[in-house]
Image (tube, rainbow, N blue to C red):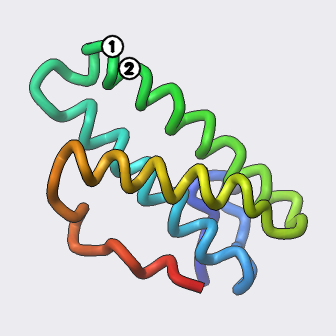
């Protein structure tokens, strides 16, 4: 059983698991940025954290509502992860790519 990444305890249906995985990955990037020197206080880091938190809220909402896949949101969240990877240059916990549908 997979639980929603937002911590609400809801069970995530099979179809939304990739969305859930992406949400968790984004949360991990935020934790990583906060743990980096400067603690995420530099403007580009703060911006990233804000954007990532907004994206996570939307991903969680789409899991809660079990609505149709939001292609725009998917593209945005994939790009967020790519942007983070470009800046930090290494895979997060070796778990990139498991969110493929
Ligand atoms: Zn949730």
Residue at image point 86% right, 67% down = 66
- Dividing the picture into quadrants, the one containing residue 101 is bottom right
Question: Up-down: is 10 above or below 53?
Answer: below
Left/right placement of residue 35 relative to residue 81 reads: left
In the image, taking residue 63 as reference, residue 92 lies left or right, namely left
* Spot occupied by residue 75 in the image (x, y as percentages of width and height): 61, 58
Q: Nearer the viewer, residue 1 or 20?
A: 20
- Tell me the residue at 72%/64% (across/down): 10
Mark 2 Cα-neighbour bin, 10 Å: few <14, some 14–19, many ≥20 = some
**Label 2 SS:** helix
Residue 27 in the image, given as x and y percentages of width and height: 44, 48
Q: Which residue is mark 2?
A: 46
Q: Which mark is residue 43?
A: 1
- Is the residue under label 1 in contact with that under label 2 (CB below 8 Å)? yes
Label 1: few (<14), some (14–19) or many (≥20) C-alpha neighbours in 10 Å: few
Residue 63 in the image: above or below residue 73: below
Q: Tell me where residue 96 appears, x and y as whole percent.
A: 33, 72
């Amino acid at each position: 059983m997979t639980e929603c990444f937002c911590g609400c305890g809801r069970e995530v249906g099979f179809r939304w698991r990739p969305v859930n995985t992406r949400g968790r990955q984004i949360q991990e990037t935020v934790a990583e940025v906060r743990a980096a020197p400067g603690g995420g206080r530099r403007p580009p880091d703060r911006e990233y954290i804000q954007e990532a938190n907004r994206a996570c809220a939307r991903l969680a909402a789409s899991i809660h509502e079990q609505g149709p896949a939001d292609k725009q949101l998917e593209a945005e969240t994939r790009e967020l992860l790519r942007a983070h990877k470009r800046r930090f240059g290494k895979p997060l916990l070796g778990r990139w790519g498991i969110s493929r549908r």
